[in-house]
């Protein structure tokens, strides 16, 4: 099948040809006709399946077919919500490429950059808006954005927006739109809260499911290093001594960890830059640009910041820290082995990460080959590890694993509850204990 078989207008076909698009991917083949027919869509697809074009192309066509009076004020007719700035900018770039032979205009609204620049773009009018929830909600509250003319809503990577705590902002934004609209919903995983949103937002949707999240590309060579605690940086330095590793995307669990790895690589003359939520948008874009151009050999990223990184010729993904959510492992290694190329995924695992490794191997249905011939082997496996894990119900993870991980809480995760403060009587008594005796009284809790 070609794009010509999908009833796409000549202007868009011309743009797709110019961008070297030949045949639609499975999600594009199934989604484009459904969206053009006005149906709601539920897309279960991970990064790298071509879903951006799957929703962008039909949106461009539907909006282009509408008659707009010359000189009239452009209204926001389609809103695309994404979890990260990088992904929003990437989608904006793609839409501009697909719509280059139409009269449509699109604008990206993200945090981390000057609001004034975005206000000027809004004053000129836009047909398609791509936005992250936080900045968009700010501009809505300032009455600088009006969503009452939105006809098509896209929620991209909804599960990641849930992980990042954006779902409440998304719900507020949705209330500012017409109830009658077309909704396209994309999520790599379907946790309970996402499933609940799907039922409340979509009307008789077409469901498109591509590449189950548990699968990993066969062309990606995977390996695991079981390391004695404290030797990950040493092992990373040794691996990167191999000059055949042209580019490597290194994943850490925390922003602080990403900065530390970057500094330590610089000490051994390996060019590296970090990309995470504490970096300004300009710093993040420059780091990504340098990585794509080859000026920087290693990009060190947190999972949240890595959303939107789309590099066809990425040779290696290295998991400096194993993720505590097994599906995240699949997303990470899927950054390599794209466009028909081979790829390599290397992971480091210390003793306290063994439960994560077990969950990952259970999800992907295979044992990741262990590299045993290295300088920092794990000397001791935690006592009764195998028995403890085997005794737990399928899929259950040890309580408190995430909170007890060294290096802090992963970027984007928030504590579910605030610790309960001690009663004033307790700390008052403690602070005055050295000054004078305090008569103890029984208390009922």
Image (spheres, rainbow, N blue to C red):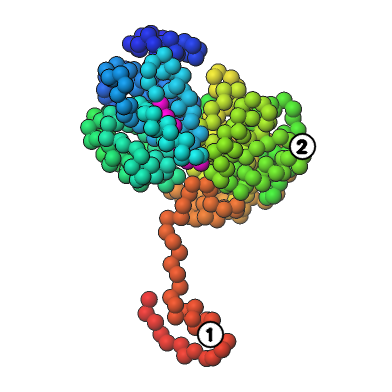
Q: Quadrant of residue 336?
A: top right
Up/down of 52 relative to 21, above or below: below
Q: Magenta stretch containing residue 107, yes or no?
A: yes
The range drawn in magenta is 106-112
| Secondary-structure class at tag 1 | loop
Residue 213 spot, x, y in % from top left: 45, 32
The front one of 249 and 180 is 180
Compared across the picture, whether 7 is left or right of 250 comes to left
Work out which residue is located at the far left of the displayed protein and give it: 180
The residue singled out by tag 2 in the image is 269
The residue singled out by tag 1 in the image is 432
Compared across the picture, whether 225 is left or right of 219 comes to right
Up/down of 394 relative to 177, above or below: below
Q: Quadrant of residue 296?
A: top right
Name the quadrant of the N terminus: top left
The front one of 117 and 232 is 117
Residue 441 spot, x, y in % from top left: 42, 87
- Mark 1 residue crowding within 10 angstroms, few (<14) / some (14–19) / many (20+): few
Please give the name of the residue rendered at 64% of the width and 25% of the height, measured from the top-left corner: 293
Please give the name of the residue rendered at 49% of the width and 81% of the height, measured from the top-left corner: 428
């Amino acid at each position: 099948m070609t794009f010509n078989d999908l009833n796409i207008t000549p202007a868009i076909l011309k743009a797709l040809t110019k961008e070297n698009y030949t045949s639609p991917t499975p999600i594009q083949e199934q989604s484009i006709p459904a969206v053009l027919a006005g149906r709601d869509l539920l897309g279960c697809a991970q990064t790298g399946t071509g879903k951006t074009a799957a929703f962008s192309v039909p949106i461009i066509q539907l909006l282009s077919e509408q008659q707009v009076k010359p000189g009239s004020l452009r209204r926001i007719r389609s809103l695309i919500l994404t979890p990260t700035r990088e992904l929003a900018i990437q989608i904006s770039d793609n839409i501009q490429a697909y719509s280059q032979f139409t009269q449509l205009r699109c604008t990206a609204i993200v945090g981390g950059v000057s609001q004034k620049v975005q206000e000027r773009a809004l004053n000129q009018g836009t047909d398609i808006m791509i936005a992250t929830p936080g900045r968009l909600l700010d501009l809505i509250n300032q009455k600088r954005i009006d969503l009452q003319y939105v006809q098509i809503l896209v929620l991209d990577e909804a599960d990641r927006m849930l992980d990042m705590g954006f779902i409440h902002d998304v719900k507020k934004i949705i209330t500012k739109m017409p109830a009658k609209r077309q909704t396209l919903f994309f999520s790599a995983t379907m946790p309970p809260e996402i499933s609940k949103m799907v039922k409340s937002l979509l009307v008789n949707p077409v469901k498109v499911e591509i590449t189950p999240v548990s699968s990993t590309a066969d062309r990606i060579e995977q390996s695991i290093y079981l390391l004695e605690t404290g030797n990950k940086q040493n092992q990373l330095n040794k691996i990167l001594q191999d000059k055949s590793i042209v580019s490597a995307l290194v994943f850490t669990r925390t922003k602080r960890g990403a900065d530390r790895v970057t500094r330590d690589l610089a000490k051994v003359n390996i060019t590296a830059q970090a990309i995470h939520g504490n970096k300004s948008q300009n710093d993040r874009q420059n780091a990504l640009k340098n990585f794509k151009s080859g000026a920087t050999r290693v990009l060190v990223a947190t999972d949240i910041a890595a959303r939107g990184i789309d590099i066809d010729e990425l040779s290696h993904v290295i998991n400096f820290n194993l993720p505590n959510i097994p599906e995240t492992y699949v997303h990470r290694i899927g950054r390599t082995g794209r466009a028909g190329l081979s790829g390599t995924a290397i992971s480091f695992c210390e003793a306290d990460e063994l439960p994560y490794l077990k969950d990952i191997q259970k999800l992907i249905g295979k044992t990741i080959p262990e590299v045993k011939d290295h300088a920092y082997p794990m000397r001791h496996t935690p006592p009764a590890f195998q028995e403890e894990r085997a005794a737990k119900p399928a899929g259950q993870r040890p309580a408190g694993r995430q909170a007890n991980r060294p290096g802090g809480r992963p970027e984007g995760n928030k504590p579910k509850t605030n610790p309960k403060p001690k009663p004033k009587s307790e700390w008052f008594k403690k602070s005055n204990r050295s000054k004078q005796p305090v008569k103890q009284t029984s208390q009922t809790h």
